[in-house]
Amino acid sequence: MKPPDDLGFVHVFIPLEKPKSPTLLMLHGTGGDERDLLPLGRELWPGAALLGVRGKVLENGMPRFFRRFGEGVFDIEDLKYRTEELAQFIDAASERYEFSKTRLIAVGYSNGANMAASLILLHPHYLAAAVLFRAMVPFVPDLIRDFSHLSVFVGAGRLDPIVPSEQVEELASIFESGGADVTISWRQRGHELAEDDVRAAKTWLSKGNIRKRVAA
């Protein structure tokens, strides 16, 4: 039996239960692990394959996907390096578990959402769509890539003390400038993820245009 980290990341893969369903790449927030968001994935798209990944950076013993110097102050060099590592992992995992990257949806919360946003900026063709809860701009890209095949849901909190509203708007603007179809769902909440966030994302994923993009 192969160890769960032999592709470069500690991870767990749950095969799809319904034919033609996508694979959800689940990226946890600070302190989570590869199983943290699996229940969320089952709720968002019942029957989808789930690929949960554990961040490789530790901050006070808590897993993260990249280093930071302080709240909202990212180590950009490390972020880009870790993003390349994740892209390589996705390549290897897609071969091992036999899923298509054109039907891959990233689902991230907080640190995981920022990692997913970085993956979009650097490797947009690794995904068909993304659900980003409490994301901010990971970095301002020198080059705006082609995001025209991407649909992005951004779940944001009006009362979020960590992610200012202008960061949410800027992130959406960057994606839209490359042609992405972006939806911002504002909640009267802080940084925590709540049931109304999940319901909004699930409704968004059920829309016909999203299903068509994933099935393409």
Image: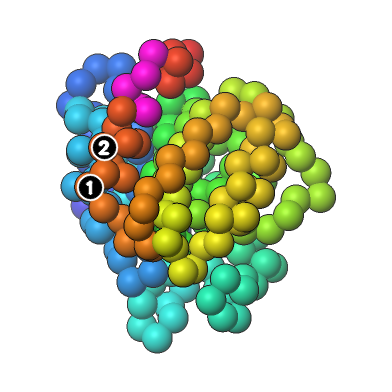
Query: What residue does disc 1 label?
Result: 195
Give the label on residue 22, or none.
none
Res 85 → quadrant: bottom right
Instruction: Say which residue appears at 39% left-offset and 13% top-offset.
Output: 208
Report the front residue among 189 and 111: 189
Q: Secondary structure at mark 2?
A: helix
Asked if the residues shown at circle 1 and circle 2 are in contact, with their CB atoms under 8 angstroms apart, the answer is: yes
Q: Position of residue 150 (x, y in %)?
A: 56, 28
Q: Amino acid at mark 1?
A: Glu
Instruction: Say which residue appears at 56% left-offset and 80% top-offset.
Output: 70
Res 198 → quadrant: top left
Which residue in the rendered view is the most extreme toward the right? 142
Report the front residue among 80 and 149: 149
Q: Is residue 2 visible?
A: no
Secondary structure, magenta segment, majority class = helix
- Magenta segment range? 204-208
Say if 30 sits above or below 184 in the image: below
- Magenta includes 151? no
Res 61 → quadrant: bottom left
Instruction: Say which residue appears at 60% left-offset and 81% top-offset.
Output: 69
Q: Position of residue 43 (x, y in %)?
A: 20, 38
Q: Is residue 168 left or right of residue 202?
A: right
Q: Is residue 69 visible?
A: yes
Label 1 packing within 10 angstroms: few (<14), some (14-19), many (20+): few
Q: Position of residue 35 (x, y in %)?
A: 24, 56
Give the label on residue 199, or none.
2
Instruction: Say which residue appears at 69% left-offset and 68% top-offset.
Output: 77
Say if 10 sits above or below 200 in the image: below
CA distance for labels 1 and 2: 6 Å
Q: Amino acid at mark 2?
A: Arg
